[in-house]
Image (spheres, grey):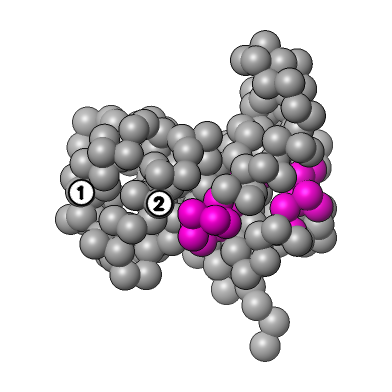
Amino acid sequence: MKKKPKIFLACDTSNIRFVRKIINSKKTNDLEILLKFGLEFFYSKNGRKFISKLKNEKIFLDLKLNDIPNTCLSAMSSLKDLRNISYITAHINGGYEMLKAVKKYSKKINKNVKVLGVSILTSLSKKSLKQIGHTKSIPSLIKKQAQLAKSAGLDGIVCSGHEIKYVQNICKNMEIVVPGIRLKGDKSSDQKRVMTPKDAFKQGANAIVIGRSLTRGQIKNNIQKLIKSL
């Protein structure tokens, strides 16, 4: 039986009513759709509480942890009541010790939770990285980050579809999750390194993150559009 494409549906809102609409509209037998909650919803009033009460849903908690190891351990400890978390993210540039700490404590939340290392954000361009102070090219930097994520024992890496070819051989047996996804014809908005769903999976992504292309307008129709595009 062919494996269903894995989709992380980004709930980029602070509106609980809208999230309920997303949940009710996302049902399909053709895709494996998980809910992704980022900082906007998690930090919103009652957002965390809403996530904790979701039943029969696999949750991708995209907090992008990035601090000293002890602070990240404390942050992970505060999440241990959220037993429905399937994925959590941490910035690879937080360093080896921080990544190891997050990975180690993740099992106290849920023995099956997976830690994904976030590499270069898809909103950053070559020019943006130069402004930050990076002198390496994007391919060189992404390779170093992939090696660090692997050595820290992470379960996967989050990277642009354009960088999949640089991490595939390094991140064997790790999930490659691709954000910055837009359906054909959609605006890239604040994203710089974007890709269509079909191209991302073709390049070797195990899962994609998609939000606005699905949640703007008629969600059910947009999901059907996504299915047809694959």
Instruction: Where is residue 120? Give x, y as percent.
Output: 63, 34
Within-10-Å neighbours for mark 1: few <14, some 14–19, many 20+? some
Residue 87 seen in the current view: no
Q: Give the residue type that dot 2 points to.
A: Lys
Magenta region, residue range: 149-168
Label 2 – label 1 distance at C-alpha:
15 Å
Instruction: Where is residue 200? Give x, y as percent.
Output: 76, 53
Residue for badge 2:
100
Query: Is residue 103 one of those drawn in magenta?
Result: no
Within-10-Å neighbours for mark 2: few <14, some 14–19, many 20+? some
- Give the secondary structure at mark 1: helix
Residue for badge 1:
77
Query: Looking at the image, which is closer to me, 150 or 228?
Result: 150
Callout 2–callout 1 Cβ contact below 8 Å: no
Examine the rendered structure and indicate whether residue 112 appears above or below residue 170.
Answer: below
- Give the secondary structure at mark 2: helix
* Residue drawn at 73 percent across, 21 percent down: 135
From the image, which quarter does the N terminus lie in?
A: bottom right
Q: Nearer the viewer, mark 2 or mark 1?
A: 2
Q: Give the residue type that dot 1 points to.
A: Ser
Residue 39 is marked as none
* Residue drawn at 70 percent across, 58 percent down: 170
Left or right relative to 198: residue 62: left
Instruction: Where is residue 199? Give x, y as percent.
Output: 81, 53
The quadrant in which residue 114 appears is: bottom left
Query: Is residue 150 one of those drawn in magenta?
Result: yes
